[in-house]
Structures are given as C-alpha cells and as structure tokens.
Image (cartoon, helix red, strand yellow):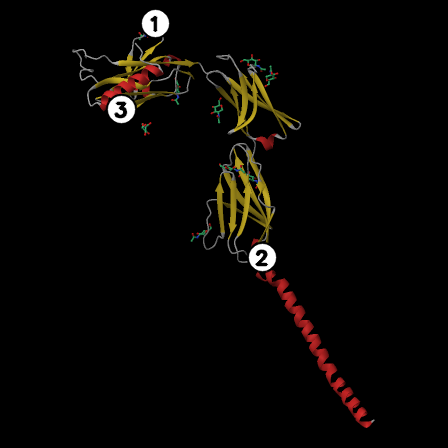
Amino acid sequence: MAAGGDVPCAVLALLVLGSLAAGGDATAGFIKSPLSQRRLTQDSVELHCEAVGSPIPEIQWWFEGNEPNETSAQLWDGAWQDRVKINATYNLHSTSTIYIANLTSEDSGTYECRASNDPDRNHLSKSPKVKWIRSQANVLVIERPVIIGQHTSSAGEVVLTCNMSAPHTPIRGHKWMLGDKTLKTEDDNSSSYISYTIEGKVEDHSGVYECIYETNPVAKGNVSIEVPPQVVAYKKSEHGNEGDTGVLTCKSPSYPPVEVWSWSKSNGDVSLFDSTRIHNDTVNYIIHATGNKTELRILKLNIEKDMGDYHCNATNQKGFGSATVNLRVRSRLAALWPFLGIVAEVLVLVTIIFIYEKRRKPDEVLDDEDGTCDAERS
Ligand SMILES: *[C@@H]1O[C@H](CO)[C@@H](O)[C@H](O)[C@H]1NC(C)=O
Ligand SMILES: *[C@@H]1O[C@H](CO)[C@@H](O)[C@H](O)[C@H]1NC(C)=O
Ligand SMILES: *[C@@H]1O[C@H](CO)[C@@H](O)[C@H](O)[C@H]1NC(C)=O
Ligand SMILES: *[C@@H]1O[C@H](CO)[C@@H](O)[C@H](O)[C@H]1NC(C)=O
Ligand SMILES: *[C@@H]1O[C@H](CO)[C@@H](O)[C@H](O)[C@H]1NC(C)=O
Ligand SMILES: *[C@@H]1O[C@H](CO)[C@@H](O)[C@H](O)[C@H]1NC(C)=O
Ligand SMILES: *[C@@H]1O[C@H](CO)[C@@H](O)[C@H](O)[C@H]1NC(C)=O
Ligand SMILES: *[C@@H]1O[C@H](CO)[C@@H](O)[C@H](O)[C@H]1NC(C)=O
Ligand SMILES: *[C@@H]1O[C@H](CO)[C@@H](O)[C@H](O)[C@H]1NC(C)=O
C-alpha cells in the first residue's frame, strides 16, 4: 500500500518528470515522503510530503490511530481544536506540510500522505481510473517524564540536581547547559538522578540551567537559580567637565531580569529619579533603562549642584540591589591649569629678568664709562 522508501520514490520521480517533459499526462508520484518520528506529549510534530504529476496532483493527509476500533479519517487545516495546521503549495509540483501542536498520546498512529491527479479523484459515486497513491509515517507520542530540578548551596559551592521519574526509554547519557553553552557532558551514564557542581557563590551563578537526558526523544528539565539583582557600577567614580553631559552606568547580570531601575542622589538632600521623568527645562536628567543596564545622563553639569554620590537601584522578583557612583565635576578652566601655570611661570621669569636687567644696566654703564675714562686717563 505505502509508496514510501527513498529509491522507489526517486525512480518514480524520474519516470514522472520524464513523461512531463514529453508533454503527456502523468500519474502522480512522490518525490518526498513523510518520516516516522517519536515525540513527547506537549511537543509538536511536522510531516512533509511532495508529489509530481501532470496535471499537478492534490495532496491529502489521513490519520489512523492505534486503537483497534479506529478508522482512517481525513485531516484538514484547523482540525483537532486547531492543533492541526496544513500548508500546501501547488507550483510546478505539489508540496504539503502538516504541523500538529501540543501532542497527546492519542495522537500516536499512522499519518498518511495521499496524492492523486485523476479528474474523478473526489467523485462521490464514480471510482477514479487511477487510485490515490499513499505514503505513511508513524508518530509515537510518549508521556512526558516528570523531571524535578533543584539546587542547594553551601560554603563556596552550588549543587544542581535533576531527578527524572519513570524514564520512558533507556538513558544513554546526559548534559548540562546554560543558555547555548554546554557546561558538562557525560556519555554512558544511565543515571536518572544527576548533578552538577559549581564552585563559587550562588549570587554569581544565577540563571536557568538545563539538564538534558539523552533518551529517544530527548527529555529536558531545568534548574532555575534566582537571586536579587547583583548591581555593579560600570565605574565607581566618574569625572565630567562643567557644562558637559555626565554619564553614569550600572549593570546587573543576574537572573531573573531587572524589572525596575531607579536612581537617587544623597548630597545632604535626597532626590529620586525614575525612568518616567524625562528631560525638560527644569529637570536635567535622562534615564535609559534596558533590562540589565541603566544609564543616567546629567545634562549641563554644574559644580555645586551635581557633584556627589549617585545610587542606582534595581528591583526584580527576588528583591533589590544597588551600587554607588561618585561624580566629580571639574571647572572648565581645570584643563587649562597646566598651560596657565607655564604661562604664569614664564611671565614671572620674564618680569624678574626684566626688573633685574633694568636695575643692573645703569650701574654697568657707569662702570663702563669709568673704565673708559680710566683707560683714556692712563
Ligand atoms: C474505540 O474504543 C474505545 C474504548 O475501547 C472508545 O473509548 C473510543 O471512543 C472508540 N473509538 C471509536 C472511534 O469508536
Ligand atoms: C507555507 O509554506 C511556504 C512555502 O514553503 C512558506 O513560505 C510559508 O511561510 C509557509 N507558511 C506557514 C504559515 O508555515
Ligand atoms: C495542550 O493540551 C492540554 C490538554 O491536552 C491543555 O491543557 C493545554 O492548555 C494545551 N496547551 C496549549 C499551549 O495549547
Ligand atoms: C527521584 O524521584 C523519585 C520519585 O520520582 C524518588 O523515589 C527518588 O527518591 C528521587 N531520588 C532522589 C535521589 O531524590
Ligand atoms: C552518573 O552521574 C552521576 C552524577 O551526575 C554520578 O553520581 C554517577 O556516579 C554517574 N554514574 C556513572 C556510572 O558514571
Ligand atoms: C523550566 O521548567 C518548568 C517546568 O518544568 C517550565 O514550566 C519552564 O517553562 C521551564 N523554563 C525554561 C526557561 O525552560
Ligand atoms: C544583558 O542582556 C543582553 C541581552 O538581553 C545580553 O546580550 C548581555 O550579555 C547582558 N549583559 C549582562 C551584563 O548580563
Ligand atoms: C518638567 O518636569 C517637572 C518635574 O517633573 C514638572 O513639574 C514640569 O511640569 C515639567 N515641565 C514641562 C514643561 O514639561
Ligand atoms: C531600592 O528600591 C526598593 C524598591 O523600590 C526600595 O525598597 C529600597 O529601599 C531601595 N534601596 C535603596 C538602597 O535605595
């Protein structure tokens, strides 16, 4: 019944394409057949089918469950409470992809791709001259195992563990990941209770860690380490020139992400800024806050008003954290001081020399005249 298998498909395709080139009618043939797959409940599955023929064949999808009393039923776009999506194209040849979301174990069974270009293929009473050709794939949906992830921390060490209950298939190994970084891989370890140890403080290692069991299909669990924001200032002290814009920056690499950033200043009086306050004539502050980073811009720096300690404060689901940045504002002239110093030094020197010269010269002239006189006299 099934026209699956790669070699017959390819041969058929050549034959069909050959007769297409010859310009005659050609019965439908598969050039791609759906592949059998295993999935966990709540996963999704995608099956793909392609056929050629002249005229271009129609593709249908049919399902037959594993229950003995089940009969074959056609699937359409939007079936099964909208969990079924079908995307078909009919250009030059026909392609069809069926996509089933949020699988349940009742979705296990045989999925059949049917193709035909017989003009009577959908006729209710007349049977078509050429039968529908069929290609089947089996989908096995396995109950998703429960994986419990936990972490404990003690002096200088964080231990992550995952425990998988009732493994559905043999465990060939496992690995630990953080984001797209693989932290540890253990092949040939069939243990369902696995662990990973991190050196250091729990505050410095927040994030969502994944434990991945090499089963068929792969089963994933996670361990979420959540801490209050560990805020750090980009620079503990910043300098700016009077009249320029001062930029203070704080970051938090922690998980969960920061929900609210705020800035405050303690300088005798305490003022609080939040990201809703924007620059206008009276308020010279702009706050940029993007997830794990915040930036306070102070426009037209003023020596008296703006010097001091600024605090950035981050809040997430686990609490808050803050850091302090000290801002120093230099006078515009400050940059000129070394130059002015040299100029002053030169001026003083020139003045001294000038005064000295002025005082000395008349004496020397007198001495000289005396000498000349003496010489003339002798
Ligand atoms: C098949 O039988 C099961 C019980 O064995 C029943 O729950 C189900 O509704 C039946 N399905 C069909 C399509 O008749
Ligand atoms: C349907 O398939 C076409 C061609 O493969 C693709 O461009 C399009 O994005 C698909 N649409 C959906 C909703 O998947
Ligand atoms: C998936 O199906 C289950 C029941 O089978 C339902 O409770 C759940 O809400 C569904 N999830 C989604 C994302 O549709
Ligand atoms: C793992 O979970 C099972 C129950 O699912 C429990 O019996 C077992 O004690 C757990 N193992 C560890 C090491 O906690
Ligand atoms: C498998 O890994 C666990 C920890 O992840 C370890 O306790 C156990 O000894 C390992 N088993 C083997 C056979 O290596
Ligand atoms: C972690 O696992 C829980 C339950 O197992 C799930 O609800 C959650 O979406 C997972 N989180 C991530 C980031 O994968
Ligand atoms: C902040 O988040 C962005 C993306 O959300 C990421 O690329 C960047 O590495 C993060 N920075 C820190 C310090 O965590
Ligand atoms: C500027 O901000 C101050 C304080 O938030 C506010 O009272 C004032 O109305 C604002 N002025 C303008 C023009 O938006
Ligand atoms: C930071 O913000 C939180 C919540 O808004 C507040 O309770 C806390 O006192 C602030 N901490 C500092 C140091 O400003």
Is residue 92 visible in the rendered image? The answer is: yes
Residue under the image location 51 percent in, 29 percent down? 180
Q: Hey, which residue is sitting farthest left in the picture?
A: 126
Residue contact between numbered discs 2 and 1, judged by CB atoms under 8 Å: no
> For mark 2, what is the residue?
304
> For mark 1, what is the residue?
68
Q: Earlier in the sequence, mark 2 or mark 1?
A: 1
Q: Which of marks 3 and 1 is nearer the N terminus?
A: 1
Q: Please rate how many residues cluster around mark 3, counting C-alpha atoms within 10 Å: few if below 14, some from 14 to 19, many from 20.
A: some
Q: Residue 61 at x, y = what percent?
A: 29, 17
Q: Please rate how many residues cluster around mark 1, counting C-alpha atoms within 10 Å: few if below 14, some from 14 to 19, many from 20.
A: few
Is residue 76 visible in the rendered image? The answer is: no
Above/below status of 352 relative to 75: below
Quarter of the rendered structure image containing ligand 3: top left
Which of the 4 image quarters holds residue 377?
bottom right
Cα separation between marks 3 and 1: 36 Å
- Describe the element under mark 2 as helix, strand or loop: helix
> Does label 1 point to a residue whose CB lies under 8 Å from ligand 1?
yes
Cα separation between marks 2 and 1: 86 Å
Q: Which of marks 3 and 2 is nearer the N terminus?
A: 3
**Label 1 amino acid?**
Pro
Which-is-in-front pick, marks 3 and 1? 3
> For mark 3, what is the residue?
93
Nearest the eye: 178 or 230? 178
Which of the 4 image quarters holds residue 46?
top left
Residue under the image location 55 percent in, 47 percent down? 248
Q: Residue 198 at x, y = what percent?
A: 61, 27
Q: Quadrant of the C terminus?
A: bottom right
